[in-house]
Structure formats: structure tokens, C-alpha cells
Image (tube, rainbow, N blue to C red):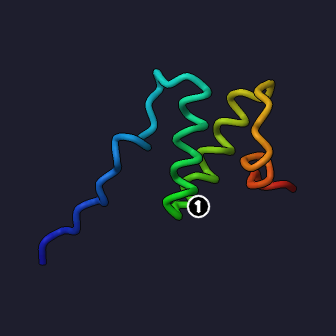
Amino acid sequence: MPALAAPAIEKSTAANPGDTPAQELGKIRQLFAQGRDDEARQRLVIFHQAHPQWALPAELDARLPRP
């Protein structure tokens, strides 16, 4: 039985270490819009940990998991 290929990641939403914080937030918004909520939420948490001083837009702040 052949191995299943990993799903293709759209370049427009692929994580890129060279992205500015604004670009990464744009990609996170795209992921939410595409219904890829788990991936978007995970990247949002990572973003927030890396940039705690960055004020998140209200729609993304509302999606940030709270303890």
C-alpha cells in the first residue's frame, strides 16, 4: 500500500521565518478564513509568545486560547 502524501501547504499561508509580524498575522487570518482553525490557533499562540508586546487585532485576540 503506498504511503499517503502530506497535504500540500499553500505558499500563501506557509510559515516563513522572514515574514514580518504583520505578514504572519495576515497568514493566520487566511488560515481561519480557510477553516484551518487548529493550525491558525497554534500559529497564533506561537506568534503571541514570540511577540507579547504586539497588540493583536480584536478578531484574533478573541481566538487566542485563554487559561
In-front residue for pair 64/2: 64
Q: Foreground residue, 24 or 43?
A: 24
In the image shown, does 59 or 6 lie closer to the viewer?
Answer: 59
Q: Is residue 21 above or below residue 64?
A: above
Residue marked by disc 1: 37
Q: Residue furthest bottom?
A: 1
- Classify mark 1: helix, strand or loop: helix
The total of numbered circles placed on residues is 1
Q: Is residue 35 left or right of residue 41?
A: left
Outermost residue to the right = 67
Residue 48 in the image, given as x and y percentages of width and height: 72, 36
Residue 3 falls in image quadrant: bottom left
Image point 54% across, 30% down: which residue?
23
Q: Residue furthest left?
A: 1
Instruction: Where is residue 38? Give x, y as percent.
Output: 58, 60
Tell me what residue is drawn at x 57 percent, y 45 percent.
28
Residue 15 is drawn in which quadrant? top left
In the rendered image, residue 30, in percent from the top left (x then y), is placed at 52, 49
The amino acid on which the numbered mark 1 sits, given as a three-letter code, is Asp
- How far across and down, in percent of the image, does residue 21 sit? 61, 26
Q: Tell me the crowding category of disc 1: few under 14, some 14 to 19, or many 20 or more residues within 10 angstroms, Cα based.
A: some
Determine the residue positioned at 23% across, 62% down. Answer: 5
Q: Is residue 67 left or right of residue 37?
A: right
- Horizontal side of residue 57 vs 11, given as left or right: right
